[in-house]
Image (spheres, rainbow, N blue to C red):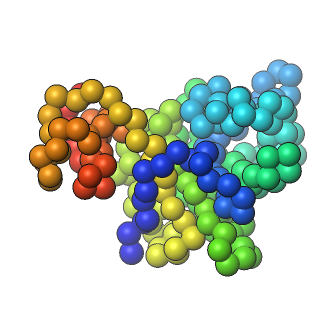
Amino acid sequence: MALQEIVANLWSFHFPDWIVIPTNGSIRRDGGAVMGRGLARQLLDKYPGFAYILGQHLVEKGNHLSTFYISNYNLTIVTFPVKHRWDWAADIHLIRRSMQELMVAASDLQEGVFIRLPRVGCGNGRLDWAVVKPVLEAIIGGDPRFTIVTEFLPRPVDFTCPHCNSPHSVGRIGPQRYFCRDCNLEFPGRD
């Protein structure tokens, strides 16, 4: 069964949903985790000090998935390792292991709690969604609790949607990847 995908801002979801943040296993000299780009950086900007919480987790448990409830913000964050080091590309084997760990962590979730994931490993991790998606699908199956959230990043494009011919609803979502809001479809294109 296909993954459920939506176009939305990941930060628009709130408790009791779990928000998945791709991370790496690097720790700074001061003990904080390296959270310099992408959603990890956005998390750090929203919740200063989280780098030290994640850094402590990395020291104690290694580069493994973990859940954190941030009571001040009523938010559950899941750190999802996709890289071994901050400056390396994402590792599909690590993504597979993290997804398996997430399935175990989610096994006792109450009904009505959803898990919102970005396209893990496909931003700063430099993997192609066509490589990552089948790995996630094989583990998630048709579990309706999981939703892939892609933020629509409108950028000027010089062509129309090949499905509906609309020039106004198309935006770039990644390298040579585009999304049409009218059709709710993703398609390849030229950059």
Q: Is residue 174 left or right of residue 23?
A: left
Residue 16 relative to residue 171: left or right: right
Q: Nearer the viewer, residue 110 or 121?
A: 110
- The location of residue 47, given as percent across then percent down, is 77, 35
Residue at x-position 72% and y-position 45%? 63
Instruction: Identify the residue at the far top of this view.
Output: 29
Left or right placement of residue 137 versus residue 47 in this view: left
Q: Position of residue 185 (x, y in %)?
A: 27, 54
Q: Is residue 47 visible?
A: yes
For residue 48, above or below residue 74 = above
Residue 179 percent location from the top left of the image? 30, 45
Identify the residue at image location x=57%, y=70%.
145
Q: Nearer the viewer, residue 155 or 84?
A: 155
Extreme-front residue of the structure = 168
Split into 4 quadrants, where in the image is the N terminus? Answer: bottom left
Compared with residue 101, is residue 47 higher up or lower down, i.e. above or below?
A: above
Q: Quadrant of residue 155?
A: top left
The residue at 42%/59% (across/down) is 5
Q: Quadrant of the C terminus?
A: top left
Work out whether residue 65 can be spotted: no
